[in-house]
Image: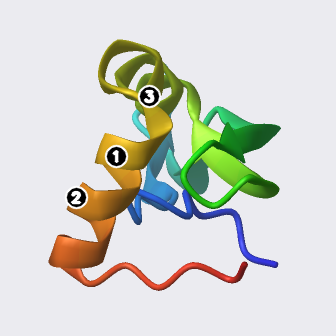
Amino acid sequence: MSKKCELSGKKALFGHSVSKSNVKTKRRFELNLIKKRFFIPEENKWITLKVTTSMLKTINKKGISAVLKESEKKGVILNK
């Protein structure tokens, strides 16, 4: 699996590390991903998702059901 948030679709960014002498080398800005199990009461089942910590805060605020509905509207496909 790639390092990508399954709900928001965020993925790693690319840039340069710049030294004091202004030499630029390629680097990646990785995501803060967490593998987490969520219980969906409407379907009475557990799902495991890889989500970013910022999306985890959104899930805690809105609830997993609301976030899943929003991601379906955006067109994010889940591998359930």
Residue contact at pointers 3 and 1, CB within 8 angstroms: yes
Give the quarter of the image for residue 63.
top left
Q: Earlier in the sequence, mark 3 or mark 1?
A: 3
Residue name at image x 43 percent, y 25 percent: 54
Give the quarter of the image for residue 47.
bottom right
Q: Which residue is mark 3?
A: 59
Number of other residues with Cα within 10 Å of mark 2, as a class: few under 14, some 14 to 19, many 20 or more: some
Residue name at image x 64 percent, y 32 percent: 32
Residue name at image x 29 percent, y 61 percent: 69
Give the image location of residue 72, x and y in percent: 30, 75
Q: Which residue is mark 2?
A: 70
Q: Amino acid at mark 2?
A: Glu
Number of other residues with Cα within 10 Å of mark 1, as a class: few under 14, some 14 to 19, many 20 or more: some
Where the N terminus falls, by quadrant? bottom right
Give the image location of residue 13, x and y in percent: 43, 56
Q: Earlier in the sequence, mark 2 or mark 3?
A: 3
Q: Amino acid at mark 3?
A: Ile
Give the number of the disc on residue 67: 1
Relative vertical location of residue 53 with respect to residue 25 in this rendering, above or below = above
Q: CA distance from mark 2 to mark 3?
A: 11 Å
Q: Specify how the rendered protein is coloured.
A: rainbow
Give the image location of residue 34, x and y in percent: 76, 36
Give the quarter of the image for residue 52.
top right
Left of 31 or right of it: where is 57? left
